[in-house]
Image (tube, rainbow, N blue to C red):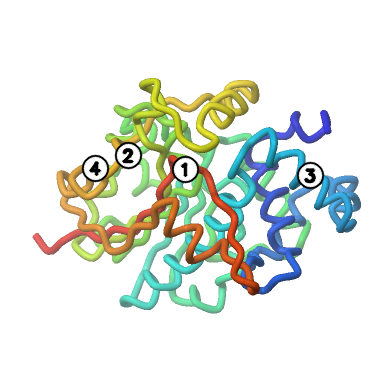
Amino acid sequence: MAKFSKLSSAEMMALVRTIGSKERDIKLRAADDLAESFLPFHLRLLLSSRMVRSLIKYIYSKKLPGGIPYIVAKSRAIDDMLESSLADGDIKQLIFLGAGYDSRAYRFKHLLLKTRTYEIDHPEITSRKRAHVEQLGLARGDVHYCAADFSAGKDAFGLDWLSAQGVQRSASTVFIMDGVSYFLTPDAFRRVVEVMAEFPPGTQVVFDYAYAEILEGKTYRGSEAFKASLAKMGEPVTGGIAESRIAEYLQEFGFEVVSLLRPLDIETDYLTSSNGTSMAPYGFLDIVRARKSAE
């Protein structure tokens, strides 16, 4: 299994979403049928075997308790939150921060016919993603790839920079941050939220976040293994939001929580099988959708 430990976080997410997309139980299956397209051929070949997928799930259930269930459930939950956000009104812009190998711009293209999409990530991952998309014949004229290190905050990711990419500050917008917030320092994440708060009322944000307490010595299901694994990959956890304080945190920037999934909610809604049994996800990550209030 050493070959899997050397994957980048973007590739690891694609690998797990591939496993989720091949679940036999419809109540547990993720809809990301494009995830495997971003993986090397040898991994796609390995993952075509049910036995290999089961072995990976077993090994990682020991190494990262709750990890694979959480990632698969999160894929489905953010899909649902995005659909709900798009159904709320006439959304003109969809912006992915830390897009990685996210495939929603292509899987949801039927809902995005009047929406300009921006995928923002580090220059290296952006270049690889664009090459993959073009090779797969998925390229769309209304999807724009923007290279930036938004961990640097307003210096590299601000309104002026966004305007230079074609983003309209006055347009109705949905921001997605999937698996990103905990790699940002508290100050960097705050600066990113400040930028999103400059968009008009009705702007929506969808993201998952870790509890800040895991950086202060408190442990939850899978938290120590999660931190150790990411540190080993060179992408350590550096930030979080205090448990049960997300509404208060977002309110400071003018956002109101629309929906919030805590670990038990994630297990109940997305990890309960057809026969009623369930799997527990990570115990320290929530998924939230929020909307900017009228000024």
Labels 2 and 4 touching (C-beta < 8 A): no
Quarter of the rendering occupied by the N terminus = top right
The relative height of residue 89 versus residue 198 in the rendered view (above or below) is: below
Q: Residue at 31% across / 60% down in the picture?
A: 204
Q: Earlier in the sequence, mark 3 or mark 4?
A: 3
Three-letter residue code for mark 3:
Ile
Task: Identify the residue position indicated by label 1 in the image.
Answer: 283
Between disc 2 and disc 4, the foreground one is 4
Classify mark 3: helix, strand or loop. helix
Task: Identify the residue position indicated by label 2 in the image.
Answer: 192
Classify mark 4: helix, strand or loop. loop
Task: Identify the residue position indicated by label 3 in the image.
Answer: 56
Q: CA distance from mark 2 to mark 4?
A: 18 Å
**Of residues 70 and 273, the one drawn nearer to the viewer in this rendering:** 273
Task: Identify the residue position indicated by label 4 in the image.
Answer: 245
Q: Position of residue 261 (x, y in %)?
A: 39, 57
Instruction: Locate residue 15 relative to residue 211 in the image: left or right.
Output: right
Three-letter residue code for mark 2:
Val
**Of residues 145 and 203, the one drawn nearer to the viewer in this rendering:** 203
Between disc 4 and disc 1, the foreground one is 1
Q: Position of residue 11 (x, y in %)?
A: 69, 42
Q: Residue at 22% across / 47% down in the picture?
A: 250
Q: Earlier in the sequence, mark 2 or mark 4?
A: 2
Q: Earlier in the sequence, mark 3 or mark 1?
A: 3
Three-letter residue code for mark 1:
Gly
